[in-house]
Image (spheres, helix red, strand yellow):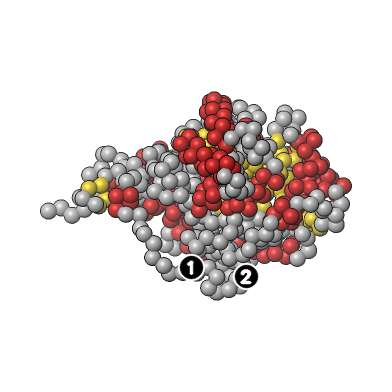
Amino acid sequence: MIITEKEVRYVAELANLKLSEQEVRKFQADLDEILGHVKRLNEIDTDGIEPMAQVLYAAGEVDSWRADRSAPPLGTETALANAPQAGAGYFKVPKVIER
Amino acid sequence: MLARRFSAVELAHETLRFAEAQNGVTNAYLHFSPERALSAAARVDRKIARGEEPGALAGVPVAVKDVILTKGTRTTCGSKLLAEYVPPYDATAILRLEEAGGVILGKTNCDEFAMGSSNETSAFGPVRNPLAPDRVPGGSSGGSAAAVAQGTAVVALGSDTGGSIRQPASFCGVVGVTPTYGRVSRYGLTAFASSLDHIGPLARTVRDAAALLQVIAGRDPLDATSAEVPVPDYTQSMDGNVQSLKLGLPREYLKDLTSETGDLFAAGVETLRTLGCEVREISLPATDYAIACYYIIATAEASSNLARYDGVRYTSRSDNSGTLAEMYRNTRGEGFGAECKRRIMLGTYVLSAGYYDAYYLKAQKVRSLIARDFARAFAEVDAIVAPVSPFPAFRLGEKLDDPLAMYLSDIYTITGSLAGIPCMSVPCGKTAEGLPAGMQILAAHFNEPTMFRLADAFERCSAGFSM
């Protein structure tokens, strides 16, 4: 076994995901199978190989820069339009600090 | 339309009516945008009336995958979390296609946040393959592929992270193009895995797909990853001449094919030979590691990108939460479907303390090897031909409960995505049951012209029996 149910619960905490007991069991089995497949990466020799974080192409160093010009922002009302709860120009969330 | 036998508005009306009537069969569209469509069509008509150039896509009905933002028109990403989300701005690709006269009919169904290979992970029900309604259309751009195949849109925009344009295109018998990474601005594309995400066209013909790419391609200051590389005129390359073009046939891509798919692909390769192409076997040795590499990198990036759906700014929110932490957890636990959760979990795990080097860094190094395989191959050949999927469209529900089997089915499309090279699917015949197969064409970075030249020549030659 590569991953335990305990680790699944821990990862769910890190990911801010509430999982049911049934989901914990299911994801333990799924992740274990997938990680079992992933283990094959250890077979391949990557000594001295640079990690590839982005697709790169030949270009000048500043080609992807844009002019630093200001543009009108969305505006508070528009930015809040999709919020589940908003008020007084802010996003509202459950209380963080108790009085 | 230019002869004024019908107007763009009439065409938009008719296509909308037809698409709405047909939608019960496939569930390809999630919602329509009649107001936006009719006002875009009216703009085209005004231009024609004034004798102005109406644009390369004048009046063309377009379907847009529901992960691409449309101002004022709901964009759900196939997720319950964004069921009511109305974007405050348009994606650059949307603005460009409307500037060229394109008429957006509506938004198409897809796997939730583009995570899936069958369109079955959508929170709004699966899409049915218009050619075989008991089968999937492929995914994640299943709705876009189905709409084009069904004729409820002439062209469509999809997005591709590991095969999400090419695989549904092959399952639905249409053309699908994943351009070079950076060729098309992703501004306004909902991020899944940022180092792999692409926007690309789906169409009935290679020419239509190239025409749509022509319009949306090019540098965009709003997307720092969009490339400062001039966009060539794609129509010029499609002259039908592929004499002596050197094609590579990767040995590693031929072993897992079902026999019928293998036969169709072999027949396609034979067609290319008769056209005068020189086909030789090549090797891409890192292929066996591509799935493992992809599902680490893509899920790691996804776990980070999907962190923003937290019940504060744009998603729905879970009602029964006392504290902020509970609110985050419940919102995400109730809102995401199983596949998104699985990938967030996998991505969070491979990035978590103690595992980063073993998984994420290792996968990035393997990605270098995959890209290197292609670079070496393109020093020898002009393009690579390969199957798109090991099998044709499968039945709804057939693979949904076996995530690894679903992931493994992406084997032929994932390598090109990891390398960031242009690749596309062209129809390549049908099985005895009438299920389409696709021929994949891959070319070097920014060599879309060679890819289109070959695809167009192949299409001209095979159109008789494939459609």
* Residue annotated with mark 2: A58
Establish if B330 lies above or below B11: below
Q: Quadrant of the C terminus of chain B?
A: top right
- Which circle, 1 or 2, is nearer the viewer? 1
Vertical position of residue B186 compared to residue B228: above or below? above
Which residue is rendered at x = 30% and y = 43% of the image? A84
Label 2 lies in what chain? A
Q: Is residue B2 left or right of residue B356?
A: right
Tag 2's secondary structure?
loop
Q: Amino acid at mark 2?
A: Ala
- Can residue A6 be seen by looking at this rendering? no
Q: Residues within 10 Å of mark 2 (few under 14, many from 20)?
A: few
**x then y, percent, for residue B421:** 65, 58
Residue underneath mark 1: A66
Give the structural element (helix, strand or loop) at label 1: loop
Image position, residue B161 (x, y; %): 56, 51
Q: Badge 1, how many Cα within 10 Å: few under 14, some, many 20+?
A: few
Q: Amino acid at mark 1?
A: Arg
**Placement of B303 over or under A58, stated as above or below:** above
At 54% across and 25% down in the image, what residue appears? B21
Chain-order first, disc 1 or disc 2: 2
* CA separation in Å, label 1 and label 2: 18 Å
Q: Residue at x 84, y 45 (%)?
A: B270
